[in-house]
Amino acid sequence: MRHQEGSFQSADGTRIYHQTWLPDGNPKAVVILSHGLAEHSSRYTNVAEHLISHDYSVCGLDHIGHGKSTGTRVFVRRFSDYTDVFAAYVHHVRNTFPGLPLFLYAHSVGALIATLYLLDLDVDLSGVVFSGPCVKVPSNVSSMTVFLAKALSRIAPKLGLSAVDASGISRDPKEVQAYIDDPLVYNGKTTARLACELLKAMARVPLEAGSIMLPAFIVHGGEDRIVDPEGAQMLHAALGSKDKTLTIYDGLYHEIHNEPEHPQVLADISAWLDAHLPSDLGD
């Protein structure tokens, strides 16, 4: 395995960190990672190592305000700050690996970023894996809560509202402790502006996801306490693609790639990727 790191500057001057894991031989395709809220791309090393063993290159960036990228932690002026940078990164990866099939592996809020990227841009990808997609407005969020989030977003945009419950990421206590101890993981509260932007972005998904025609594999933990599995079911129903698969893993928590059963989860994902390579590569 080979590992490379780099950075680029976004339109607003934010420095965006990215990295690439490469197999020793020639890759047959490239998987682009879109990580979740408050975390960073280096938490996906086990995913990268598995995919590299199947001859994929894996590329990941740290979203604005996350990990080794600069910017105010878990804060954006508008949700398109995420998708614009992600689009620039996908373009960079495409130029780095010309001619190779590209897939997305998008987790949690990273799946929401990927979804809106797919909605707003004409993209040429071979498929997308949505893991624990945070794409549905929670059923316990009332219209009054949405109103308050919008109001706070205007008058106190950096006010902290809520934080990720680390105990819900995995049933493996070592994974939970590693998350808590990771200096690049943000353990504070999500800002009011970001909360508002997340809700607005989620509201688009059931209305517009029918325009996404890419092959899609949606995977979710059945006991996810951080993101409701109903969002995965909604996304599966809403996608316009005729080639879409939903797998709910009974008993698993939010980060299914960090659960004790992750070898089976990752094997399912690499098998799906293999099945969606162009025919001249999949033989």
Image: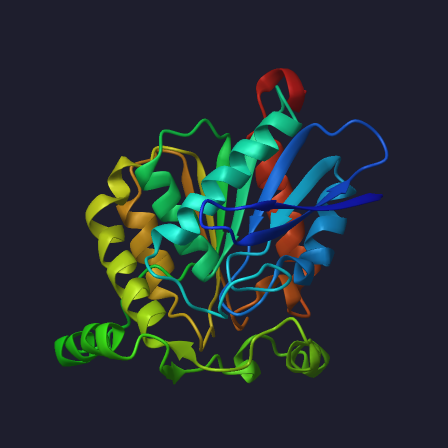
Could you tell me residue 249's position as x and y percent?
A: 52, 63
Image-based side of 102 in relation to 233, left or right: right
Residue 283 image offset from top left, x and y in percent: 68, 20
Nearest to the observer: residue 25 or residue 146: 146
Is 236 left, or right, of 96 in this rendering? Answer: left
Q: Give me the residue at 62% from left, 48% from top.
A: 60
Q: Position of residue 274 (x, y in %)?
A: 63, 33
Pick the front one: 113 or 276: 113
The quarter holding residue 239 reads: top left
Q: Is residue 3 left or right of residue 158?
A: right
Q: In which quarter of the view is residue 177 placed?
A: bottom right
Image quadrant occupied by the N terminus: top right
Residue 92: percent from left, percent from top: 58, 33
Indicate whether 75 appears above or below 4.
below
Identify which residue is drawn at 58% across, 56% down. Answer: 62
Number of marks in the image? 0
Q: Nearer the viewer, residue 9 or 30?
A: 9
Q: Residue at x 52, y 32 (%)?
A: 91
Residue at figure coordinates x 63%, y 61% from the top left:
257
Q: Residue furthest front?
A: 13
The answer, for residue 275, to whether it is visible in the render is: no
